Image: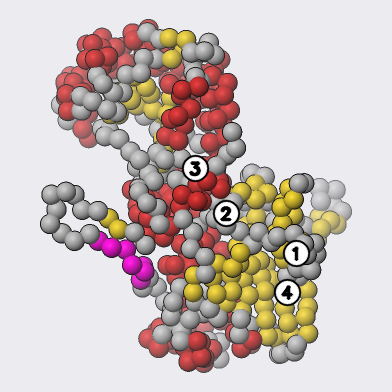
Amino acid sequence: MGFINPSPQSTYEPLRFTKFVNMENIILLADAYKYSHHKLYVPGTQYIYSYLESRGGMFEETVFYGLQYFLKAYLEGPVITAEKIKEAGEMLPEVFGRNDVYDATRFEYILREHGGRLPVRIRAVPEGTVVPVRNVLMTIENTDPACYWLTNFLETLLMQVWYPCSVATLSREIRKVVRRFYEATASTAAFAGIDLVLNDFGFRGASSVEAAGIGGSAHLVNFSGSDTLVASTFAKRYYHAKTAPGLSIPATEHSIVTLLGETGEASIFEHVLNTFPEGIVACVSDSYNIFRACEEYWGTLLKDQVLARNGTLVIRPDSGDPVKTLLEVFRILMDKFGFSLNEKGYKVLPPQVRVIQGDGISYHSIPQIYEALQQAGISAENLVLGMGGALLQRVNRDTQEFALKCSYAEINGKKADVQKLPVELDADGHLRTSFKKSKAGKLRLIKDAEGWKTVAEGERPGEEDVLETVFENGTIIKDQYFEDIRKRARIPV
């Protein structure tokens, strides 16, 4: 699955990534109430077939990404063991306060008959595919009639694919915004750096290392800038990324810049330039007064050294109103360092100076910032962005309204389409069908000249189903690669 190369001076063997062994007990990774379902399904139930979709939400299309992580980390191989069955048998009676809910024989059957491998089939769109909302993205069904209860038992875990899908979708939508302002104000040459415009600063604000890895790698589907190192680890470990897809640069933080106090700030800035005389280096410059730092230190005292560098100094404001602060910072920098006009007539700082805004960045603030720059005649190519909590944490399952619902079953050999059709009251108190209505039957996803369509299994048989079998009976059937995922999600030029 890839490996980490040691440094040339290292005498150690490379650390090779084999199958990731997750220590969680799959038997305990479901909502507690699901342990009663083996009894609550009507007698004679043999097959349960369910599907995943984004029912709507913030954006009109969804990037499908992250399923392979959950398959490899939690479902692949013999995941049911005697030890796990015993652990569950000790804990679940404590949860329910009774002994007639959890049935260990259900899992003992999987261990005995299937060697601990889960008898389910999962089909899904290729990861990185961008699909309009209200279409099937994934299906799951049991392959052994004795395990009819297993399909939706796995819902709790598999539903968590909403998170990487939502982050990948959000990141891609921001890329659309960036492209729009680049097309309006940036030079043709600047488009080569658009992959690095939005940088992931979210590791420290993520709810866990796992969230940072899977969410951070979802961002890397669309951009390359990232300080969330574990995101590249996940992309290499679970998606065969050939090289680390997340790129970063040397940069300071306040603990560095404030060491000599306010009077020593300029000396720290000079030390930064001396330490990295070439290449890109970023320096947070608002520890005391961002405007003084730009005007008196970077733009006067250190101006000649900055312009003499074979590389770029990236100045970082980190507080205040982003729009007001950036407009003043650019006014000062362009007054001190000068500017040129690109072919679209917008101002561009010398290549040795750029700005990064990492505070207050969100899907809603980014277009406001770029709009203000455009109104001031400043090209978008002068600015890159850092996004933390708003990228990896300010999403939830309802961002894209994800749901996994049963749509087909077989009971005593009879096929049955299954559907929920809830009603709700509109603003005038009239009944209407809720957007939470589900689809019925076995489903296919096709794409024709008119776009994407979810159709019933027997409908339009001559057209290819985009859904592919990715997992069956404990085995990964289709292994997906990060580079291919990026290509699928790429926004057409």
Residue depicted at 71% across the width and 90% down the height: 43
Q: Which residue is mark 2?
A: 64
Q: Which residue is mark 4?
A: 408
| Residue 18 colored in magenta in the image | yes
Badge 4 density bin: few <14, some 14–19, many ≥20, Cα 10 Å: many
User: Mark 3 is on which residue type?
Assistant: Asn
Question: Which numbered dot is residue 222?
Answer: 3
Residue 186 coordinates in the image, percent (x, y): 51, 20
User: Mark 1 is on which residue type?
Assistant: Lys
User: Mark 2 is on which residue type?
Assistant: Phe
Q: Earlier in the sequence, mark 1 or mark 4?
A: 4
Q: Secondary structure at mark 4?
A: strand
- Of residue 426 and residue 60, the one placed in the foreground of this image is 60
Circle nearer the viewer, 3 or 1: 3
Q: Which residue is mark 1?
A: 439
Residue 123 coordinates in the image, percent (x, y): 61, 67
Residue depicted at 55% across the width and 51% down the height: 128
Q: Secondary structure at mark 1?
A: loop
Against 121, is 104 above or below?
below
Badge 2 density bin: few <14, some 14–19, many ≥20, Cα 10 Å: many
Q: In the rendered view of the protein, which quadrant contains the C terminus?
A: top right
| Residue 115 colored in magenta in the image | no
Describe residue 183's horizontal placement relative to residue 231 as left or right: right
